[in-house]
Amino acid sequence: MRKSAVIALAVAAAVPAVNAQEGQGVVGSAAANAAYSCNPATCVPPACFCPSPNPPGGLPPQKIPQFMTLTFDDSINSVVLPIIMNITQSHHNNPNGCPLAATFFVSAQFSDYWNVQTMYGLGHEIATHTWTHLNTPPGPVEINSAIETINTFGGIPKSELKGFRHPFLLYTNGSIANVAASKLLYDSSMSLDYTSFPTWPFTLDNGVPFVCDAIDCPTQPYKNPGLWEIPLYNLRANPNNSLNAAMDPNPIPPAITANEADILTVLKYNFLNRYNSTRLPMGLYIHAGLYTLFVLNALAVPEPAI
Ligand SMILES: *[C@@H]1O[C@H](CO)[C@@H](O)[C@H](O)[C@H]1NC(C)=O
Ligand SMILES: *[C@@H]1O[C@H](CO)[C@@H](O)[C@H](O)[C@H]1NC(C)=O
Ligand SMILES: *[C@@H]1O[C@H](CO)[C@@H](O)[C@H](O)[C@H]1NC(C)=O
Ligand SMILES: *[C@@H]1O[C@H](CO)[C@@H](O)[C@H](O)[C@H]1NC(C)=O
Ligand SMILES: [Zn+2]
């Protein structure tokens, strides 16, 4: 829902690791929470899963796919849909022949439910992102009214609406508990510096294993048995610098205007870094506006190839 004039990648040598999302700077969590513990002998899948840098079930990394998630946030309507479909319906298939599937964290306000239904029908996941996208940690009404509205007008079964992302990634112990109380399967709102604290998605049975970036973390428990957290993993510009892996063009200096080659370099580095080691999932969390600007910027360089 935000538009700006340039795509900018911050190569942040002089500022702390930053992983801005939804227009605000959020420090990607990097340190372990000393108060946390999880016993894999008692926390047993699928109901419970301890955080781990390694693939589930003791599987060797070479035996598993490199999972990637592609997520879009906010309302879905005729303004953003063609931009998104240019990516998701681009006829690039997975190796097993299945088309690319994205997850849409839909905010109910300003959404066109015919468009929501179209994306669901094409095999994408529809998840929720509150009703009005307030700048405060959401209460039950914001969470549940979005589920009701998307179910009623989009025709998406409630059993398929499994995921939630906090607007502006603003969460507290209380709002995470509200997500659990709405019987959702997972939250995906906690940003994480994957190089310092790599972990696969985990359940919140024992709380949060890293020093998360919420205002009341880690002093509050965040214990919600059975609720999964799929962290938002940051992207690194190179081994030494942090990158502002923003959903939006980055306003934080020292920013550089990225061209197609810069973006490709960053994506390849982050992909191979995982692919060559533990195959930690990789995510791209974006607003449609970033793609628009990317296409315009990429077209501005000599000899574009998109
Ligand atoms: C989709 O991408 C093509 C180039 O591959 C471009 O010509 C077209 O304008 C794009 N459409 C939208 C809606 O962005
Ligand atoms: C954290 O949330 C849970 C669930 O609502 C609640 O029981 C608990 O009291 C909260 N913890 C604190 C310290 O507020
Ligand atoms: C990262 O830092 C190390 C040690 O200072 C240096 O040797 C290396 O060249 C740097 N790599 C990049 C890509 O800047
Ligand atoms: C990953 O492995 C490839 C092929 O062996 C190598 O070219 C690349 O430099 C490695 N990249 C990283 C980030 O580890
Ligand atoms: Zn949002």
Image: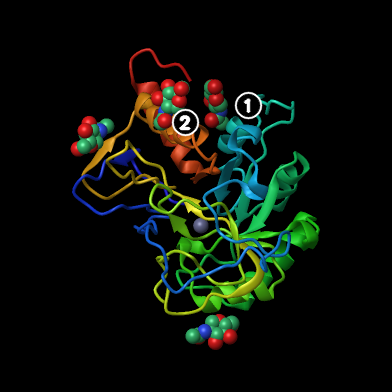
The residue depicted at 81 percent of the width and 58 percent of the height is 157
Tell which quarter ligand 4 is in. Answer: top left
**Front residue (pair 247, 171):** 171
Residue 53: x and y in percent read 52, 50
What is the C-alpha distance between the residues marked 1 and 2? 23 Å
Disc assigned to residue 272: 2
What amino acid is found at the position of numbered circle 2 in the picture?
Answer: Leu
Q: Is residue 282 visible from the viewing direction of this image? A: yes
Which marked residue is nearer to the observer: mark 1 or mark 2?
2
Q: Ligand 4 near label 2 (Cβ, under 8 Å)?
A: yes
Residue 147: x and y in percent read 70, 65
Q: Farthest residue toward the front?
A: 41
* Pointer 1 residue: 90
Judge from the rendering whether residue 239 lies leftward or rightward of residue 33; answer left or right. Answer: left
What amino acid is found at the position of numbered circle 1 in the picture?
Answer: Ser
Mark 2 neighbour density, 10 Å: few (under 14) some (14–19) many (20 or more): few
Judge from the rendering whether residue 140 lies leftward or rightward of residue 231; answer left or right. Answer: right
